[in-house]
Amino acid sequence: MAKKKLVMIGNGMAGVRAIEEILKANPDMFDITIFGAEKYPNYNRIMLSPVLAGDTTIEDIILNDEQWYEDNGITLHMGKRIKEIQRGYKKVVAEDGTVAEYDNLIIATGSDPFIIPVPGHDKEGVMAFRDIEDCDKMFAAAKKYKKAAVIGGGLLGLEAAKGLLNLGMEATVIHDQATLMNMQLDSVAGEMLRADLEEQGMHFKVSTLTTEVTGDKRVSGLKFKDGSSLDCDLLVMAVGIRPNMALAKDCGIHCNRGIVVNDYMQTVTDPSVYSVGECAEHRGIAYGLVAPLFEQAKVLAYQITGQGLKAYQGSVVSTKLKVSGVDVFSAGDFMSTPGADVLELMDKVGGVYKKLVLEDDKIKGVVMFGDTADGPTFFQWMQDGKDVSEQRSSLLFSASGLGDSGHSGIDLVSEMSDETIVCGCNGVSKKDVVDAIVTQGLTTRKEITACTKAAGSCGGCAGLVDQLLASTLGTAFVESDHEPICGCTDLNHEQVKEQIKNKKMTMVREVMNVLDWKGEGCQVCRPAINYYIGMIWPEDSEDDRTSRIANEKMHANIQKDGTYSVIPRVYGGDTDADTLIRMGQVAKKYDIKTIKITGGQRIGLYGVKKDDLAAVWSDLDMPCGYAYGKALRTVKTCVGSEWCRFGTQDSTSLGIHLEKELDRIWFPAKVKLAVSGCPRNCAEATIKDFGIIGVDGGWEIQTGGNGGVHVVATEMLCLVETAQEVEEIAKAYLQHYRETGRHNERCAKWQKRLGLESIKALVVDDIESRKALVTRLNIYLAGQARDPWLERIADDAALPTKKVFNEYRTIEIKEIN
Amino acid sequence: MSSSTSPINDAVWHPVCKVDEIPQSGGRTVNAGDLSIALFRLTDDSVKAIENRCPHKNGPLVEGVISGGDVLCPLHNWRVNLDSGEVAAPESGCVKRFPVKVEDGQVFLNL
């Protein structure tokens, strides 16, 4: 099939990023032609200020050199300005007459600097600060002229003034507002910035409107509205940008402030024409920051290569900047009105200022100057609508100081040294992550994981990685709640469950076929589908062994040397002499090296060879302990009232009973229970998925706790009187978790996602729904729940008569030449 | 970079098992002297053989989940391609591959 023709007008960061994403998704789909008005390949426009300041060179900020275009078979027309789009003929015409036809067109013309049309604005020596050419002009001017004026006290204007100062010129910034960077800073921070810059040698004229540019041929001065004037021989206008949409407008594409696009980055007028970057207007906003533009580029690539629907939802942006060596951060609505709830911290000597605007105990806006380490954290909390009343008294001193275990993703990432290990599992340092973000242009945690492995194993550092992403990109991003299960599909967990239910699908392969899976699935999605099928259709489906990871396939834990551990049930941690003797004999017979009391009050045999597994299970004659799976692990108990002088309830008996009742069930993730006989809580019930604590006259039920990587204490679900109620509520709670939990999502996270109150309503308060949940769990128990060790032993015993091969057995080739 | 494949020697085709004796999308271990080989049957019933040892920490690849033409090591999820023997980025490395032929449902391994 012939390739489709894709033409892009514009050769800037957002557009080329979109091309990169398209090539990544499908390198052979398009013949690509790019027209760029500038005579440079794609470069990093954000780095123009450092170029001007002499910190880096133009060569260093080129993102894609000409070789890249060649390597990817892209026809690049540099320095050719398009003069017309002929939508009827589906072609574009350049000023020099070059014509290119297209099937799809991307308009990525970016924006133009805005030049204030005051008299004299067209004199020699008046310029904007927008591209490499402007930098060159400033370099040249600095050699001949001494006095520079910059109109515009925003970020770009200040950076330009700072650059000119560095080049040895005098620089005066003229700003029409009283506060510098008034879009990002309040008056206090603006004043501090001004004082800092004045110290560096910059001059200011604020609240000043320019009325005329004076001079003969070349600019020689400025006149202001208040009658004053200023001498200058170079004038830089940095008062803002305007989406460059003339081409689109001329060919009848609907434009407002920018080229209006839908959620898939298609122009609303012509679906074959796309627009991305600063020229595009999405839901009324034309973005000027990089992170949202890269997000748009992704969505565009996704749509144009026909991978399905992925909508751009718009971005909430914050600003984290280094203005001439000074850190500033702002987000949200930080201009406090009188009477607003404002927290302020001012350290004049240290040059630190922080202001938080609160409303109903939630952060509404934030401005920070000097110390911006907590900016991303505050921004996250602002987006989450987090109640900060508890932290109120210490909030401004350091939100990051609240914890560093990665819990809730709060950390001092910005103050970490480069060598600090972020991901302990894979040995990934802060520098590795930041470098990957910068050099590969990553915008999501998933990409970082794919690239560096950080957060790819236990996930404990996911919060840290998110923070690094936020602080590196200088704008926040939110991990969407509707992330697909994995790269094999666009559907999320809930959508897949819904489809399995509605279409009554009972086989993993069937689900992948029907739901248009890419490829044959992976170790993330296949086990998830297999679990969902078993949970939704307990009576009509069979477990798919090939969709289980090694541990769950072998019903034993694979160890680092390829041997296995065998951990049988010791219900409630309660055993007897005969069992212990038998375990010892088995360990001797099979030469098992390590016998270990596990953390869950049972006994593990480590170093069992694969071919011995079934024999070991058979000789042990004990139930499978599920120590390897997403299932009930242990019910930890204390000795309780039977022996303990403090015991108020018989915790051991209840623990044994619960472990027997809940045995042999697959869950979204592992489940741990504990029963303590009194509030001294020796069984540590408050860090378990489902914890029970005996109190005088009843049982307290605590849920949603977690030990391990993220320590989470349980929340109190309810107080009941009898052990029978405990059992019923445990079953209802866990069945609710089975039905609504996402595969690999522990109870703690699930409870946080659903909210304790909503869970309580269904499993405690509404007796009908509680009973219905218990009934559904019992149906599952009657159907699918079987002891896997016994099954395997029975299968092996039947082999000789059934003449079936034993797939677990190793094949030996004896005669080797 | 490509991993080594043993040169095919017609004299040393060893019969190992029937295709049906390997679970679909699953694997069997074949031992030959000190060598452990992972034999896989893919969804299209093709059979592949690679050394049963992940280049990372020697994980038994035969127990891994099969995903397309790759197997994921059960220890740390390294992704090994069954045709090239190469490990997918960001990791690197490769495992030895062995020629396999199937005649009338009988699998032969060339060692």
Image (tube, coloured by chain):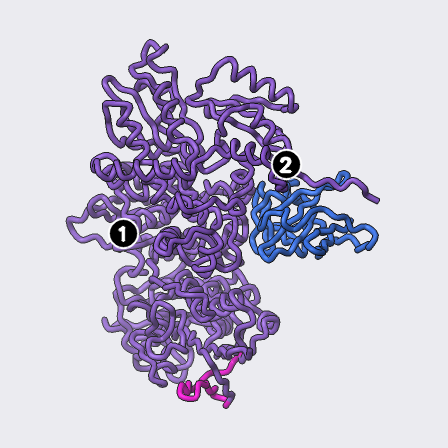
| Label at residue A110 | none
**Vertical arrangement, residue A488 with respect to residue A17, above or below:** above
Q: Secondary structure at mark 2?
A: helix
Which chain is represented by purple in the image? Answer: A
> Which residue is located at x 69 percent, y 47 percent?
B17
Towards the viewer: A456 or A202:
A456
The Cα atoms of the two marked residues, 1 and 2, are separated by 74 Å
Q: Secondary structure at mark 1?
A: strand
Towards the viewer: A559 or A81:
A559
Towards the viewer: B49 or A149:
B49
Q: Which residue is mark 2?
A: A800
Same chain for the residues at labels 1 and 2, yes or no? yes
- Residue A166: image location, x then y, percent: 47, 62
Please state which of the two labelled residues, at mark 1 or mark 2, is closer to the viewer: 2
Label 1 or label 2, whichever comes before in sequence order:
1
Q: Quadrant of residue A775?
A: top left
> Which residue is located at x 39 percent, y 61 percent?
A202
Q: Please indicate whether residue A171 sits to the left or right of residue A356 in the image.
A: right
Q: Which residue is mark 1?
A: A365
- Residue A658: image location, x then y, percent: 36, 26
**Vertical arrangement, residue A355 with respect to residue A519, above or below:** above
- Residue A127: image location, x then y, percent: 41, 76
Q: What range is drawn magenta here?
A: A78-97
Could you classify mark 1 by the number of other residues whose Cα lies within 10 Å: few (under 14), some (14-19), or many (20 or more)? many
Query: Which quadrant: the N terminus of chain A?
Result: bottom right
Q: Amino acid at mark 1?
A: Gly
Queried whether the magenta region covers residue B92, the answer comes back as no
Q: Amino acid at mark 2?
A: Pro
Could you classify mark 2 by the number of other residues whose Cα lies within 10 Å: few (under 14), some (14-19), or many (20 or more)? few
- Residue B60: image location, x then y, percent: 64, 41
Question: Which chain is indicated by disc 1?
Answer: A
Rendered colour, chain B:
blue
